[in-house]
Image (spheres, rainbow, N blue to C red):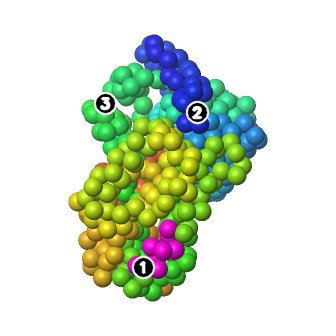
Amino acid sequence: MAMLQCISPIDGSVYAERETLSLGAAQDVAKRAKNAQKAWARRPLEERVQLVMKGVARVNEMADEVVPELAHMMGRPVRYGGEFKGFNERSNYVASIAADALKPLIIEESNAFERRIEREPQGVVFVIAPWNYPYMTAINTVAPALMAGNTVIIKHSTQTLLVGERMVRAFVEAGVPEDVFQNVFLDHDTTSALIAGGYFNFINFTGSVGGGRSIEKAAAGTFAGLGLELGGKDPGYVMEDADLDAAVDTLMDGATFNSGQCCCGIERVYVHESLYDQFVEKSVAWVSNYKLGNPLDPETSLGPMANKRFAMVVREQIGEALSKGARALVDPKLFPADDGGAYLAPQILVDVDHSMSFMKEETFGPAVGIMKVRSDEEALALMNDSPYGLTASLWTQDPERAASIGRDIETGTVFMNRADYLDPALCWTGCKETGKGGSLSVIGFQNLTRPKSYHLKKVTQ
């Protein structure tokens, strides 16, 4: 057994540590989840939904502890108050659609036959959650999975070591049975062994492309369902008829909020030549207003990145781009807290192109590249010149134009005049190396259940 340590980006100290489970102990957890699942699924749907929502409410009651904990573990400034808005919005929405999403599809109800398709829980759902939005990303699967009658085991990122533990405690205190929702601390080998051993019926993972490949390999031959949200390099495209100020405000926020550590953060922006100079000038002014510092200080608007090794990737990408002719426009003197480690000043690069890793590989930091384009065709080719596809943000006054371009973008979600938002009524999904599957919406419930057909003949002749 090993010790997992959360190293705080605030000062590099060990903020929390937990001992990993042995394979045998982890198998026992999975067996308890399996044994508890059918009884949980037999409870009325309304009761399951109510218990989940009581768990959500209990997490909200922990805000005074949760918010500074997040600052310590992954660096988000306390001024932003945690993740409760999205956490609650997503939970409330899936609760509101659960009955409709899970109701049987009736084919025939006659004197001769009953024919219908019901939705049955997958069984034991394993959630491997990331650190960047540790509560919101986890609830995307935890809430609908439990509502649908599955039992859930959560394994959280070491960087946000305490989140799974805190969520499970809240839900159990709210009345969810202990074996129905369990938290585990596991190393990679034990995680892979559990997956390969067929202990889970569905696995949801949010993280790196490499991590997703490892999970697919471990699950090979088990026939477990997989939901994988992996890398991203989401583009914005500002057309000549865009609302310039709104585009700057939303796209720069999407590029830098949470220190750029957002699954659907904006990492590259293509601007029509007629607005390019104004867009760049306004964007530099916008980004330069951040105050980088200790996330526990309520005046801080940009905290450290979650780990100094993540910041190193951003610095390396920026350095390579500068060596190839890119220009950095944000004055580093405005950010004296940049220490060469986890504390990283935001940056905007121009004179960039797709020969630079900064414009092709995931950066996941508070830095964005801006390129000038002359046409929709040029912008479309650049947006699709990526191994990833999660979201794309289009800025125009013309919905038909946005929809037309959107049909040709290789992505999971097309936004018009919006960015960096997860709509719980729509399927959250990606393509290419961003992964597969989909969470939230009716489709999320479908992925967490399996169809079961009933063909009931009422006569024997």
**In this view, 383 is above or below 404:** above
Q: In what element is the residue under mark 1?
A: helix
- As for residue 163 lying within the magenta part, the answer is no
Distance between the Cα atoms at labels 3 and 2?
36 Å
Look at the image and tell me whether residue 125 can be seen. no
**In this view, 413 is above or below 11:** below
Judge by depth and name the residue closer to the eye, 17 or 323. 323
- Identify the mark at residue 218; answer none if there is no mark: 3
- As for residue 280 lying within the magenta part, the answer is yes
How many neighbours does mark 2 have within 10 angstroms: few (below 14), some (14-19), or many (20 or more)? Answer: few
Distance between the Cα atoms at labels 1 and 3?
49 Å
Q: Residue at x 27, y 34 (%)?
A: 217
Judge by depth and name the residue closer to the eye, 2 or 308. 308
What span is colored magenta in the figure?
Answer: 276-284
Residue type marked 3: Ala
Single out the mark in the foreground, 3 or 2.
Answer: 2
Q: Which residue has dot 2 on it?
A: 11
**In this view, 226 is above or below 419:** above
Q: Mark 2 vs mark 1: which is more N-terminal?
A: 2
Q: Mark 3 vs mark 2: which is more N-terminal?
A: 2
Residue type marked 1: Asp
Q: Position of residue 431 (x, y in %)?
A: 33, 56
Look at the image and tell me whether residue 240 can be seen. yes
Q: Which residue has dot 1 on it?
A: 277
Is 79 placed left or right of 241 in the picture?
Answer: right
Distance between the Cα atoms at labels 2 and 1?
39 Å
Residue type marked 2: Asp
Q: Residue at x 33, y 43 (%)?
A: 209
